[in-house]
Every structure is written in C-alpha cells, then in structure tokens.
Image (cartoon, grey):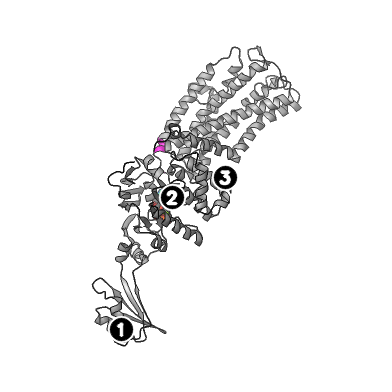
Amino acid sequence: MTQPADAELAIETRELTKRFGSQTAVNSVDLAVPLGSVFGFLGPNGSGKTTSIRMMLGLIAPTSGSVRILGRESPADLAGILPRVGALVEGPAFAPFLTGSQNLARLDSADPLASTRTRSARVAAALDRVGLAHAAGKKVHAYSLGMKQRLGLANTFLMPRELLVLDEPTNGLDPQGTREVRNLVRSLADEGTTVFVSSHLLAEIEQMCTHAAVMSAGRLVAQGTLDELRSVGIARVELTTPDVGAACAVLATLGLLPEAYVADAAHLVTAPLTGDRRPAAHEMVAALVAAGVRVDSFVIQESSLEDRFVALTGEGFEIVQ
Amino acid sequence: MSAAPPRRLGLALLGTEICVLFQRKRTWAMLLALAAVPVLIAIAVRISSSPRPGRGPAFLDQVSQNGLFVAVTGLVVAIPLFLPLTVGVVAGDTIAGEASNGMLRYLLIAPAGRVRLLWVKYVAAAVFCVAATLTVVIAGLLIGLILFPVGDVTLLSGDTITVAEAIPRFLAIAAYVTVSLLGLSAIGLFFSTLTDVPVGAMAATIVLAVVSQILGALPQLDWLHPWLFSTYWLGFTDILRQPVSWESFGDNALLQGGYILVFGALAYGRFLTKDILS
Ligand SMILES: Nc1ncnc2c1ncn2[C@@H]1O[C@H](COP(=O)(O)OP(=O)(O)OP(=O)(O)O)[C@@H](O)[C@H]1O
Ligand SMILES: [Mg+2]
C-alpha cells in the first residue's frame, strides 16, 4: 500500500468545530497526533473530548473544519480509514441478549476485511487478551461494568490496527484491570500502534503517554510531549531543617527567593526554581552544609502535569458551558 | 487489500444479523403468537357447531369440511393486525434498537458502512416477514390436518383441485402476504432512522398500518385507496380462483415496490447524514 506524503501524523484536525444548537462543544481544535505516539487527550467533564472523537470516527459531521486520519480525509474516506482503526467510544455497548463472544463475532462480521475463516480464533484470542476467556459464553446482560469495559477493549483487538482510539478505557476497571490496560497500551505502542487515549485521570496519562493535549470548554489549550507540557510549570526546592533562618540566608545568596513555613515539628523551607535562577541540587546542598545548616530532607519537586492541568483548565468544579 | 465482492455486500453481516434476529426470545414469542392464531381458530371451530356461512372471517365456514382452509382463514385473521404488529416491532427496531443500546456506533466503526447496514437490516426484516407468514400457514396446515378432514379443495370459482395442486397455491398465498408486508417494513425502517427510541418507531409503524386500513374502509376517500399500502392486503384470495388471477399479485408487488423505493430512499437520505450521538 502506498503511504500518502504527509503520513507522519496519525490524527490531524484543522479548526475542527462542532456546534449543538447555540452551544459550541468543540471550538476550532487543531490536533496533531504523531504516528507511533501514545497520546493522552485530557480535559474536564464536558470539555469536548468525546465529541472530538466522534467526529474523527465519522459518527457525527463537523460543523466546520477537517480531520485527517492516517493520511486520509475523514469522513470522505471512512471506508479506507476505519478498518485500520480500533475504537472505544464513550463506554462499551453490546447487545445484552448475546454472549460476549457472539457480540464480538457480530462486530467482526461487520468488518469487510475480516476473514470469516479465522473469526472464532481471533475472537477467542481477543477475549483471552483482556482476561475474559472464562466469561466468553456468558450473556452480556450478566456482565459487570468492568467486564463490559474489557469486552469493549477486546473488540478493538479483533484485527491488527494502526491506530487505537480509546475514550476513557480504564473507566470501571479494578486496579488489576487498570494496570493491565496500561501494559496493553505499552505493548501495543511497542508494536508500533499509535494510541490515542482520552482520560481525566492525570496520573494514568503521566504513566503511559508520550504526548498529551488538554481541552477546556471545547478549546484545545495545550498540546505537546509530556516534558514540554510539564516544563511550563515551575519546579521547587523543598527542604526541612531545624535551622530555618540560616537555610533561607544560604538559598538567598544563591539567588533564590526562599519562603519558610514553621508548623509544629516540621520546619519547611521552599523556593521556586525558575529558568534563570536554578542552581544545581548538589550546589545547594554543598552550600547548605558548608554554612552548617542541618538538613533533614532535601527534594526538588518537578512541576506535575496536575499543576499544569489545573492552571490551564481552572480550579472550578462547575461544568463550563 | 481487496475484499471479495460478495463480502462488500455484507453477506457475512447479513448472516449474523439473521442469526441474531432468531436468537432473540422476542422473535420466537411473536412467531408463537402468530402460530396461535390459526390454532385458536381451528379449536374454536372444532368445539362449536359448524358456523353458518357468511358469518365470521372469510373461509371460516369451509374449515370444518377441509382442514387446509385453516391456513387461509388464519391469514385472513392475522393480516389486518397481528402480522403488521410483529412486522412493525421488527422493522421499527432495526436502527433505533441498535442506537438505543449504543451498539450502532460500534457497528459503524467496525465498519459496517451506513448503506450496507441499512440494506442488511432491511433484508433481515424481510426475512422475518417470510418467517411470520410461513408460521401462520404451516401452523394452520398442521392443525387443520390434525383436527379436520383434508381433501380436494373447492375454489372460489367453484372448481375443485386436488391437495397436490393446492399446495403450490398455498405457497403462492404465503408469497403474496410476504410481499404485502415489505412496504410496511420499509416504512418501519425509515421511522427507525428518525429516533433512538425503538418503541417510538415500532408504535408509529403499527399505528400507520391501522390508519391505512381505516382510510381504506372509508368510501369517501376512494381516490386515495389505490395509493394505500394496505389496499391489496386481502387480495390473495384471487389465487384461489380457476384460472389463477395474478393481476392483484402484480398490482400489489408494484405498489409495495413503490413504497420500498420511496421509504428506502427516505431512510437512506436520513441515515447517511445522521449524527450518531447515542
Ligand atoms: N447530543 C448533544 N446535544 C447537545 N449537546 C451535547 C451533545 N453531546 C454533547 N454535548 C455537549 O458537548 C459538550 C462536550 O461533551 P463531550 O461528551 O464531548 O464531553 P467529554 O469531554 O467527553 O466529557 P466527559 O469527560 O464527561 O466524558 C458538553 O457540554 C455537552 O453538554
Ligand atoms: Mg466523554
């Protein structure tokens, strides 16, 4: 198969916009998801993640803007795109009166490129991969939430895919299931599959993604590699010592702006480490020890994705309309 | 990357759709209810004194002389309400049923393809029409054989044919009734693309079938009658004449074909651009 010229991006949207009546659910979003990345799609509830995913997969038509998936235009060339994409959109959904394996076989038969001959073997392998082999013959209405979620994941593994789009894949999973999903995503990424995963669980994104984008109220407010996203935030030095005054003086001579907190037994000194005022850790420790400061603990707190996320999307708990 | 042409038509999907249809308890419950129609008629005739000619549904007075007429009487009774009811349930469920449990999005991502999914769903509904009609006919023939004498069939024209000659006519009647239900199935398919609530599409389809028959019974509206999809529903009795009059079969097929085209096109136009938000 010939690769189109600009195929380095697995997903590329240009000014993608969707309006529902007067409400703009997705507002002029320019996403660029590199091939081979594990891309985290972050955003608070109602920020437009699922709506964007639905447009990428051709389930809903954009109000304006365009989407390219694996180098092909969506929705014009959906028939060329979808067989190469596995997706979990807004939770799993299955016919409750069919068993897990019947449901998968049914979805597989809808794929024109899936071979009838290998169907039952592929269904069994996919069920095995998500740990559902023993529940394969059970009707889906008797599945728990997490079992349905696993079945939804199994559906994306029926055929080899170049791109996986997973909308909140760990929703409803137990800790083992969550860890298993992380491992699955990693192993798929190692095989070269691009994984686009939406979530609002920051720790999870931090653990498995190479890139991320942040949505807020329908707009894309940041995207890049995880390091790029984090680096915008501010790292801090934090140390505990009984000699608070001396420690502050030493840090001040190194060009920092220390603050001291004295509460009960803990004497905490902290200072922001910004670009031009960032002495190396060993310099600071050496200076502190040389000045006779008794250091009980010393940490450099790198800025977390969470700080960045909250900075970008706001502290408020209310859904932004 | 080239799939064999038949697979592009979605024959694999059609196969699983038909299996899924007959894996549902609901389908079997409806077929059982349809089978009960001729059975109840036969039992009622059997335990009562023979009805006077001219009362009750057509052919009822013939049942006690010839058990084969149970099947025909069963169809006469079932076609105004019971058959449209079951067909309305199946056709109204086609797209809306998938939308309501969220499976529609996974079928489309699979990718079933919107056009392919639509025609596969329609063909599956048509297969149900065949099954529903045959259920009434076969249940009627069986119970007729058990409860009544079976012999040469006296036709509406007064001629008599043997049982062997009668069987193809019964199959032709089953075909006629199946064709009669195809237009209604297309209407149900269209309604099903309009909503994510299957019960709504089912109810609308069934109500329309009843309304069409009521309009067909009003002489003031006779200009409208040739356009009603229920106009020829009871015309299958023409097959019980000698020689067979195929005219109403042809008119019916043409009318139903027209309904399939119009409502198929409407369903296509609606479903192809529909936002799948369920
Ligand atoms: N069918 C619809 N009609 C009207 N508005 C809608 C519809 N679907 C979504 N919206 C609106 O679009 C916005 C984005 O919704 P979306 O489902 O994309 O959010 P999300 O980021 O996936 O949220 P969550 O984290 O809760 O899954 C919301 O404000 C929502 O109210
Ligand atoms: Mg969502």
Q: CA distance from mark 2 to mark 3?
A: 21 Å
Q: Secondary structure at mark 1?
A: helix
Three-letter residue code for mark 3: Phe
Three-letter residue code for mark 1: Leu
Q: Quadrant of residue A186?
A: bottom left
Q: Nearer the viewer, mark 3 or mark 1?
A: 1
* Count of numbered circles in the view: 3
The local crowd at label 2, few if under 14, some if 14 to 19, many if 20 or more residues have their Cα within 10 Å, is many
Image: A151 above or below B139: below
Q: Residue furthest bottom?
A: A292
Q: Which residue occupies the foreground of this view, A148 or A159?
A: A159
Dot 2 or dot 3, earlier in sequence: 2
Three-letter residue code for mark 2: Val
Cβ–Cβ below 8 Å for labels 3 and 1?
Answer: no
Q: Quadrant of the N terminus of chain B?
A: top left
Whether residue B81 is visible to the viewer of this picture, yes or no, is no
**Does residue B274 show up magenta in the picture?**
yes
The local crowd at label 3, few if under 14, some if 14 to 19, many if 20 or more residues have their Cα within 10 Å, is some
Q: CA distance from mark 3 to mark 1?
A: 70 Å
Q: Report the magenta residues as a range.
A: B269-275
The residue under label 2 is A89
**Does residue A49 show up magenta in the picture?**
no
Dot 3 or dot 1, earlier in sequence: 3
The residue under label 1 is A288
Q: Nearer the viewer, mark 2 or mark 1?
A: 1
Q: CA distance from mark 2 to mark 1?
A: 54 Å
The residue under label 3 is A97
Q: Quadrant of residue A280?
A: bottom left
